[in-house]
């Protein structure tokens, strides 16, 4: 599919504007999008807020174009308080973990990358994007990963404009988070260490981030 220059980019993919209502998300690695599109369609069918997926072909996924800032952008602009953002993250995880697992088993759907850069604040409410890591599994792993990512930003192992202000967001999230954010924290840390988008310096500080999560649990 011919496209112009990307108007947005993440660690793994570029996003191209197709028209007023559609965008193309393309993985640079050539990773297949079929499974991701299937999980998004399943979540949408159960009323969870995700972008509509129009097609998935190889590394390309055509999706609904969403209008609104990310949660992180809104916080930086002073349009969203960090405590409010923490409550929103906790609620999005809770709603997700209420969904039945796709295989009919005893666990649930998990996102495994739900953080302020992957929530868009739209006219219809918060919408969760970037379902690349999603699947079926224990909700506590999902909760632990969100806490761990917030901790990585808070301690400075991931550079972000919000920086140390995220300490307050993390503490509020830990108060409100569904499930147990530390029960599977070691598994969450191991998962983060295996992610190819993590730099050696970021990986080296995952233990410190996990310790920050444990310190915030009361």
Image (cartoon, helix red, strand yellow):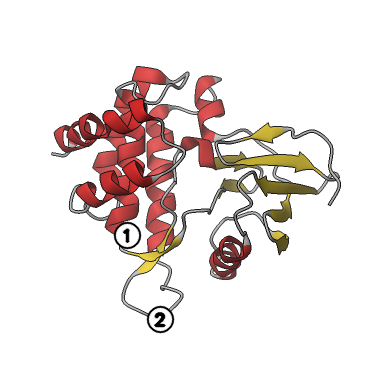
Residue 58, position as x, y percentages in the image: 68, 60
Residue holding disc 2 = 104
CA gap, disc 2 and disc 1: 15 Å
Question: Badge 1: how crowded within 10 Å, few (<14), some, or many (20+)?
Answer: many
Residue 104, position as x, y percentages in the image: 40, 81
One can see residue 177 in this view: no
Left or right of 87 on screen, residue 213: left
Left or right of 1 on screen, residue 158: left
Residue holding disc 1 = 139
Question: Badge 2: how crowded within 10 Å, few (<14), some, or many (20+)?
Answer: few
Is the C-beta separation of discs 2 and 1 under 8 Å?
no
Query: Which type of secondary structure does the marked residue at label 2 adopt?
Result: loop
Residue 120, position as x, y percentages in the image: 58, 41
Residue in front for this viewpoint, 132 or 64? 132
Q: Quadrant of the C terminus?
A: top left
Quarter residue 53 falls in = bottom right
């Amino acid at each position: 599919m011919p496209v112009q220059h990307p108007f947005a980019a993440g660690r793994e993919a570029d996003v191209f504007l197709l028209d007023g209502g559609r965008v193309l998300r393309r993985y640079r690695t050539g990773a297949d999008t079929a499974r991701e599109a299937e999980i998004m369609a399943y979540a949408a069918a159960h009323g969870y807020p995700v972008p509509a997926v129009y097609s998935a072909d190889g590394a390309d996924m055509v999706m609904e174009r969403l209008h609104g800032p990310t949660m992180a952008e809104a916080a930086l602009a002073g349009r969203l308080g960090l405590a409010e953002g923490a409550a929103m993250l906790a609620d999005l995880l809770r709603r997700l973990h209420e969904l039945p697992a796709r295989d009919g088993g005893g666990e649930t759907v998990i996102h495994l990358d739900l953080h302020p850069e992957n929530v868009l604040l739209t006219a219809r409410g918060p919408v969760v994007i970037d379902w690349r890591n999603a699947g079926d599994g224990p909700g506590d792993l999902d909760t632990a990963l969100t806490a761990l990512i917030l901790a990585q930003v808070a301690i400075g192992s991931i550079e972000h404009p919000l920086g140390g202000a995220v300490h307050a967001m993390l503490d509020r999230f830990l108060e409100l988070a569904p499930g147990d954010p530390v029960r599977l924290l070691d598994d969450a840390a191991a998962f983060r260490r295996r992610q190819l988008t993590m730099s050696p310096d970021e990986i080296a500080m995952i233990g410190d981030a996990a310790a920050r999560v444990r310190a915030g649990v009361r």
